[in-house]
Image (tube, helix red, strand yellow):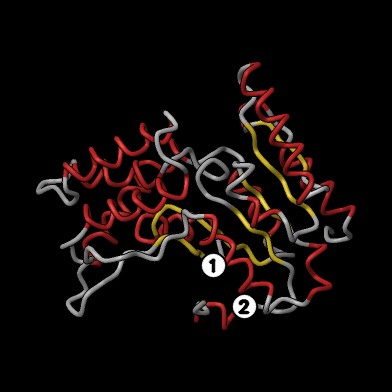
Amino acid sequence: MNKDTILETLDQTKPVAFFDVDGVLVHPYVILHFPKFLAQQTPSLFKIDKLHLMIERVENYRRGEVDYEQFATDWIRTYAAGIAGNEVNTIGLQAEKFWSDNIDVLLYPYARALISLLKPYHTIIAVSGSTTDSLYPLTKLLGIDYLFASTIQIDENHRYIDKEPINRATDKGKEEVVQQVKGIIDNKLWPLGFGFGDNIVHDEPLLRHVGSPYLFADVSSEEKQQKLNKQFAQLQLKVPQVILLRQPQDNPHILSIISKRLSALGLSN
């Protein structure tokens, strides 16, 4: 696999904190919210038929008509087709406007404070299936150190093109990022690391190697609770120390939980 050149600046002396983005820091899914926003501009900056196809693909996946890997692959490809032809600078300016208009709606209330809590002791790394073009302004607003997200290719004229993107929505995409980071950070620092995800199966790479893995979960119904219990037991076979957190609206004590964990690790003042 190709090593991301951005990791050449990674501080080897600090542990890392991995964050999934959708469902952990913001309401999902940015990769749908942002193209809807682009499609509403005049002229439209995202092809309407591709936006409808993205929505259709989500519905097909939720009905169990396709497996996750196929869905994740097709979803990012469809996004690339939808945004193709636009100038990078144009989309960048729209992304800044998108977050300026929507951050109070999309951002979970604890997100800024959680990153601020960990940042003095950890390198903050966000790994997301949503796209770099849509998420980059958010990383600046939150103080995220590194972003590894799905990336749409660009031509020599600095326009997005409809070619095979770098896909971080797949399980393989997230695993590759973690393995690259593991090749840089000293093994003795991994027990001090944190990981945050919201999907038992697909965020497992972000949780498996760190000493403090946390999983946000939807337990809004008995059916979801039963399904979660079964999946959680399976996850614990790979990540025995994983800690289950309810969704943000059900758990107002997230910051207190993380603060106490930092103290237990000897990382807080």
Write the residue at 37% across / 37% down: 58
Q: The residue under label 2 is which amino acid type?
A: Leu
Left or right of 143 in this view: 154 = left
Callout 2 secondary element: loop
- Which circle marks residue 146 in the picture? 1
Q: Residue furthest top?
A: 222
Residue 20 is situated, as x and y percent measured from the top left of the image, at: 56, 51
The Cα atoms of the two marked residues, 1 and 2, are separated by 9 Å
The x and y percentages for residue 196 are 65, 49
Q: Give the left or right position of residue 41, taking residue 218 as reference.
A: left
Residue nearest the observer in this picture, 23 or 118: 23
Name the residue located 20 percent from the left edge and 69 percent from the top edge: 159
In the rendered image, residue 27, in percent from the top left (x then y), is placed at: 48, 38
The residue under the point 75% across, 61% down is: 193
Quadrant of image for the C terminus:
bottom right
Is 55 drawn above or below residue 121 in the view shown? above
Checking the image for residue 128, the label placed there is none
As drawn, the residue found furthest toward the left would be: 43
Which type of secondary structure does the marked residue at label 1 adopt? strand
Instruction: Tell me the kind of residue under disc 1.
Output: Tyr
Q: In the rendered view, tell whether residue 121 sits above or below residue 51.
A: below
Residue 83 is drawn in which quadrant? bottom left
Q: Which residue is mark 2?
A: 10
Q: Find out whether the residues at labels 1 and 2 contact each other: C-beta distance under 8 Å.
A: yes
Residue beneath the point at 41% across and 49% down: 70
Label 1 crowd (10 A; few <14 / some 14-19 / many >=20): some
Q: Nearer the viewer, residue 262 or 69?
A: 69
Q: Is residue 235 above or below residue 193?
A: above
Q: Earlier in the sequence, mark 1 or mark 2?
A: 2
Is 65 placed left or right of 192 in the picture? left
